[in-house]
């Protein structure tokens, strides 16, 4: 059942998450026919050192994936804001992949005196943070739950079996969901199966597992008499 994971991808974004054809998607396609795809959501570049504005502008204008640098600039107490128009859809994975190159070009010209933001950069940072959380939180949740189960069940093999079955069920559910969505629907939002916050799912599973295991362990301990291995309510054998 987990073979469906071979076709799993994570390119579901806020720009293609709709199951039907909506006005925003139609407008984006019309925009791309006559203008750069990123014209509806420019990328902001904030330069805190006004002496380096020209250098930063020249650097980011030549960065890969940048269609044009807006001639209009906004000056404020914190610095000068520049606006970039991307060649790719600003809400697509292709647009997100352009953010590191733009940041490298900007920092190469002004060091730490420049920041790159805007909708595309924000979405890129969010996806990077979610990826780091998944790599860190999921193993921690598994280790903590394993230790708790070992303490409650006073065993090692049983907790390993429990955790193994949960992991297998999780990936099997993802595989079945990916296969069923790709065969039952042609909507991009349905075909692009993306795990919904695995770190949150594993955290919820950890709390549910420990809370359900404790009453069972408590009942087992209370049903046995001190220093004996049989139930306290069991009658003594007749002599």
Image (spheres, rainbow, N blue to C red):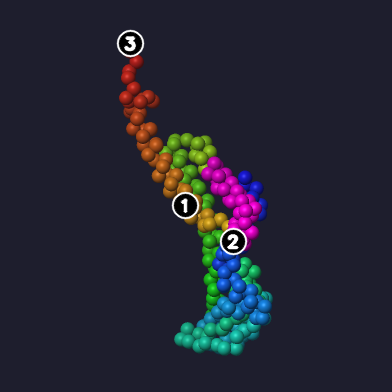
Q: Nearer the viewer, mark 3 or mark 1?
A: 1
Residue at position x 47%, y 35% in the image? 155
Residue at position x 51%, y 55% in the image? 199
Residue 71 numbered tag = none
Residue 203 numbered tag = 1
Residue at position x 54%, y 76% in the image? 118
> Left or right of 7: which side holds 224?
left
Q: In the rendered image, which quarter contains the N terminus?
A: top right
Query: Marks 3 and 1: CB-CB under 8 Å?
Result: no
Which residue in the protein does label 2 denote? 189
Q: Residue 168, position in %: x, y? A: 57, 44
Which residue in the protein does label 3 denote? 239
Which region shows up in magenta? 164-193
Nearest the camera: 127 or 152?
A: 127
Task: Give the answer, above or below, for where 181 lies relative to 102.
Answer: above
Q: Secondary structure at mark 3?
A: loop
Q: How far is mark 1 from mark 2, CA to CA? A: 26 Å
| Residue 179 lies in the magenta stretch | yes
Q: In the rendered image, which quarter contains the C terminus?
A: top left
């Amino acid at each position: 059942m987990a073979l469906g994971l071979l076709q799993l991808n994570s390119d579901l974004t806020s720009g293609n998450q709709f199951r039907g054809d909506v006005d925003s998607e139609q407008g984006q396609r019309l925009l791309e026919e006559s203008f750069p795809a990123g014209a509806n959501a420019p990328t902001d570049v904030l330069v805190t050192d006004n002496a380096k504005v020209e250098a930063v502008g020249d650097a980011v204008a030549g960065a890969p994936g940048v269609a044009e640098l807006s001639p209009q600039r906004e000056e404020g107490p914190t610095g000068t804001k520049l606006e970039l128009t991307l060649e790719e859809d600003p809400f697509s994975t292709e647009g997100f992949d352009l953010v590191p190159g733009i940041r490298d070009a900007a920092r190469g010209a002004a060091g730490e005196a420049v920041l790159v933001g805007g909708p595309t950069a924000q979405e890129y940072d969010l996806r990077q943070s979610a990826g780091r959380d998944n790599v860190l939180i999921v193993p921690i949740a598994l280790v903590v739950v394993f230790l708790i189960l070992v303490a409650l069940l006073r065993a090692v093999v049983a907790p390993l079996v429990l955790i193994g079955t949960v992991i297998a069920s999780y990936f099997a559910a993802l595989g079945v969901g990916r296969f069923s969505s790709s065969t039952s629907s042609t909507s991009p939002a349905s075909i692009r199966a993306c795990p919904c916050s695995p770190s949150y799912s594993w955290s919820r599973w950890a709390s549910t597992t420990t809370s359900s295991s404790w009453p069972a362990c408590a009942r087992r301990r209370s049903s046995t008499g001190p220093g004996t291995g049989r139930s306290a309510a069991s009658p003594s054998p007749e002599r």
